[in-house]
């Protein structure tokens, strides 16, 4: 009888990482050896809550620790052996689904080489756990001198994910010639539904929309008039844009989600501190549209999209990932007014917008993001 084929455990682990959860549990029953390999620790490793950071090379923060834990959250350097991160000058984090992160990577020296080149960027679907990625085809209208904001979400069917790219030209303080393109992951193709007639100014520091319940939301301001702050919304199912106006007395600093609902961090004129407000049913009148979850002081935080310091991500459980200083990240609990410092085990240099994203580790391949749900 021939000797049984032996595979090193690290190779077996890589194979297991690509399997869905149910088959993994079935494999545990085949032998004591496999039962040991597919341990609860291995299963939990695949479902860790993480935060992807705007850095090159790629970094993330383990978000499984809480404020009651003695061990601080740790920063880790991610595996990306097939991606030459040294070729890029900036990373934009668009969003995440099923453990796959959508990134826009901008090449170095694009404008110097050819300002009309459609190849000034690289859009990828990236699995931070496995290091696997899939390149999104370039839309033909991309130009490096234009301004772009992005979105990632779906309407009613989670297997029909869309990438939204809004293009606009800026002339002084005015934004003109807006249009938007849609990439369907289901058909793997770009389309251009229509021009965008909204005259809002999107905030450059937060160029990615927040997805919640079939809609995308972007921070914006008016070119003129009152109120100054507003939210541009997109119904992904109908591809229709609309606005949500913010009352004059409020300064809107950051959008995110809280328990799956759109939320914002804002402050009131002549009032110390910040508020976490969550959106109620969208058809309610403006006075009933928002509810205040909590208020918290401003002594530790620099929540300002005009500054190099600010909030990177609102976590869905009511915490913030924010920069306390240029090289110190903290996770601040808005509900408890407490924080913990992130253990910077590796050097971290931000090379992107003030935007991070929360994701749950998974073994899903970027090519299967629309066909597998966890």
Image: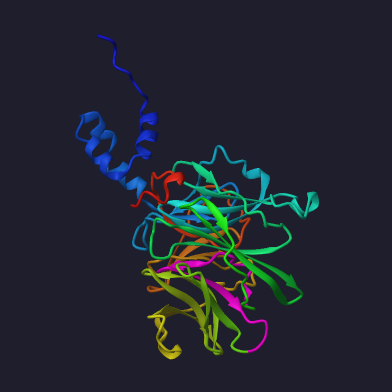
Q: Nearer the viewer, residue 313 or 139?
A: 139
Q: Nearer the viewer, residue 144 or 14?
A: 144
What residue is rendered at 69% in x and 49% in y?
A: 119
Confirm whether the magenta stretch covers residue 217: yes
Residue 355 locus on image (x, y percent)? 55, 62
What residue is rendered at 40% in x and 49% in y?
A: 361
Is residue 12 depicted above or below 334 in this figure? above
Residue 102 locus on image (x, y percent)? 52, 54
Is residue 94 depicted above or below 129 in this figure? below
Residue 9 locus on image (x, y percent)? 35, 28
Q: Is residue 215 left or right of residue 27?
A: right
Q: Is residue 107 left or right of residue 154?
A: right
Whether residue 215 can be seen here: yes
What residue is rendered at 47% in x and 67% in y?
A: 236
Quadrant housing residue 204: bottom right
Q: Is residue 224 left or right of residue 287?
A: right
Q: Magenta part of the protein: which range?
A: 200-225
- Colour basis: rainbow
Q: Nearer the viewer, residue 214 or 296?
A: 214
Dividing the image into 4 quarters, which one contains the N terminus? top left
Residue 19 locus on image (x, y percent)? 34, 40
């Amino acid at each position: 009888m021939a000797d049984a084929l032996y595979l090193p455990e690290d190779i077996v682990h890589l194979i297991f990482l690509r399997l869905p959860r149910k088959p993994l549990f079935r494999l545990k029953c085949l032998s004591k050896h496999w039962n040991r390999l597919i341990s609860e620790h291995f299963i939990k490793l695949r479902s860790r809550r993480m935060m992807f950071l705007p850095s090159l090379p790629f970094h993330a923060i383990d978000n499984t620790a809480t404020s009651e834990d003695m061990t601080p959250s740790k920063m880790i350097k991610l595996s990306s052996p097939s991606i030459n991160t040294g070729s890029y000058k900036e990373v934009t984090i668009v969003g995440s689904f099923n453990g796959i992160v959508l990134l826009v990577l901008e090449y170095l020296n694009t404008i110097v080489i050819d300002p009309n080149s459609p190849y000034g960027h690289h859009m990828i679907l990236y699995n931070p756990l496995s290091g696997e990625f899939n390149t999104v085809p370039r839309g033909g209208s991309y130009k490096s001198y234009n301004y772009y904001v992005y979105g990632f979400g779906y309407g009613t069917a989670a297997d029909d994910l869309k990438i939204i790219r809004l293009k606009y030209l800026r002339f002084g303080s005015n934004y003109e010639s807006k249009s938007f393109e849609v990439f369907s992951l289901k058909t793997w193709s770009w389309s251009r539904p229509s021009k965008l007639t909204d005259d809002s100014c999107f905030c450059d520091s937060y160029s990615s929309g927040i997805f919640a319940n079939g809609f995308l939301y972007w921070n914006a301001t008016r070119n003129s008039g009152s109120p100054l702050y507003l939210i541009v919304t997109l119904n992904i199912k109908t591809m229709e844009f609309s606005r949500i106006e913010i009352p004059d007395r409020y300064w809107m600093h950051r959008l995110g989600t809280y328990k799956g609902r759109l939320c914002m961090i804002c402050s009131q004129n002549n009032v110390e501190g910040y508020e976490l407000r969550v959106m109620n049913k969208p058809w309610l009148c403006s006075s009933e549209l928002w509810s205040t979850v909590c208020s918290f002081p401003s002594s530790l935080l620099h929540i300002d999209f005009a500054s190099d310091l600010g909030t990177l991500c609102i976590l869905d459980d009511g915490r913030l990932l924010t920069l306390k200083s240029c090289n110190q990240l903290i996770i601040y609990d808005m509900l408890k007014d407490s924080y913990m410092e992130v253990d910077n085990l590796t050097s971290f240099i931000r090379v992107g917008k003030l935007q991070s994203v929360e994701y749950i580790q998974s073994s899903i391949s970027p090519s299967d993001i629309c066909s597998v749900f966890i």
